[in-house]
Image (spheres, rainbow, N blue to C red):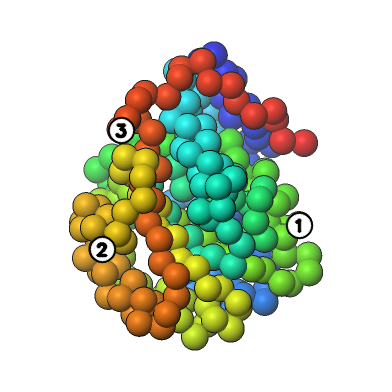
């Protein structure tokens, strides 16, 4: 795949300006999203030209493949409005861009500065590059979604490759908060072969024991919980000639 670096983002934002694009915009749910959202990793971005050449080498085909898999879940109504979506992949930012085109949704990305423990700057460059590519679109879509202060869905991005495995669900929305917002469905997405799973099985597969208690509490509140693997690479490699969507205007 031959692509210009950050093709979808012409502004080349960085630091706080880039982080601002990924922040939730609806003040009506800010007490939930603001306590989860952590964009320290994005805020420390340096010159965008120093980030990565991943979009020139074709790695972004994986991002598009994950987007297409999530689009399939939307088209088949496996993901609908009034849903809390917890994404545990290395492609949470592009996945959210797809969701924001189709749902009235706001994000909360968990990207602390020590996400990768200082051990894997390749993953750090991946996240920064994804933010560069989809930041403009996400900012525009979430601002549009927030215009009437009636957000119907929430997205939490965990990033599957975190070295800092301490995920504290105490900041996640309670069943009471979700029901007050009209959210009746919970969807957990993970890097696993594309199919539906029992959520407990997929959590175990992803080694997320801290999430088990959270999902158990939601299940006791009679919320509808589903889990899906969305990694098409574990069946077939994405087509390296996969066509990118047109630049966001």
| Circle 3 crowding by C-alpha within 10 Å: few under 14, some 14–19, many from 20 | few
Q: Is residue 8 above or below residue 36?
A: above
Q: Is residue 193 above or below residue 101?
A: above
Residue highlighted by disc 1: 144
Disc 3 vs disc 2: Cβ atoms closer than 8 Å? no
Distance between the Cα atoms at labels 1 and 2? 35 Å
Q: Is label 1 or label 2 in front?
A: 2
| Circle 1 crowding by C-alpha within 10 Å: few under 14, some 14–19, many from 20 | some
Mark 3 or 2, nearer chain start: 2
**Residue at disc 2, secondary structure:** helix
Mark 1 or 2, nearer chain start: 1
- Going by the image, does 112 lie left or right of 35? left
Q: Residue at x 67, y 74 (%)?
A: 27
**Residue at disc 1, secondary structure:** helix
Q: Quadrant of the C terminus?
A: top right
**Mark linked to residue 28:** none
- Going by the image, does 6 lie left or right of 109? right
Distance between the Cα atoms at labels 1 and 3? 35 Å
Give residue 87's position: percent from left, percent from top.
42, 54
Disc 1 vs disc 3: Cβ atoms closer than 8 Å? no
Q: Residue at x 50, y 68 (%)?
A: 185
Give residue 38's position: percent from left, percent from top.
46, 62
Mark 1 or 3, nearer chain start: 1
Q: Residue at x 30, y 33 (%)?
A: 234
Residue highlighted by disc 2: 200
Q: Look at the image and tell me whether residue 53 can be seen.
A: no
| Closer-to-camera residue (135/235) | 235
**Mark linked to residue 234:** 3
**Residue at disc 3, secondary structure:** helix
């Amino acid at each position: 795949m031959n692509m210009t670096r950050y093709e979808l983002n012409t502004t080349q934002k960085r630091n706080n300006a880039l982080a601002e694009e990924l922040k939730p915009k609806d003040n009506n749910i800010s007490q939930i999203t603001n306590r989860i959202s952590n964009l320290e990793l994005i805020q420390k971005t340096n010159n965008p030209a120093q980030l990565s050449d991943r979009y020139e080498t074709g790695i972004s085909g994986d991002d598009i493949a994950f987007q297409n898999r999530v689009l399939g879940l939307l088209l088949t109504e496996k993901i609908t409005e009034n849903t809390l979506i917890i994404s545990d992949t290395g492609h949470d930012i592009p996945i959210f861009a797809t969701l924001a085109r189709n749902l009235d949704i706001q994000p909360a990305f968990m990207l602390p500065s020590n996400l990768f423990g200082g051990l894997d700057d390749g993953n750090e460059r991946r996240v920064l590059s994804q933010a560069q590519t989809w930041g403009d679109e996400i900012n525009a879509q979430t601002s549009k979604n927030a215009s009437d202060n009636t957000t119907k869905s929430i997205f939490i991005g965990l990033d599957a490759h975190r070295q800092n495995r301490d995920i504290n669900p105490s900041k996640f929305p309670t069943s009471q908060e979700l029901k007050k917002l009209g959210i009746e469905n919970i969807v957990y997405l993970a890097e696993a072969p594309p199919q539906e799973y029992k959520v407990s099985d997929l959590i175990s597969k992803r080694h997320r024991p801290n999430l088990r208690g959270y999902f158990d509490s939601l299940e006791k509140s009679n919320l509808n919980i589903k889990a899906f693997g969305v990694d098409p690479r574990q069946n077939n490699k994405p087509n390296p000639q996969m066509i990118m969507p047109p630049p966001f205007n």
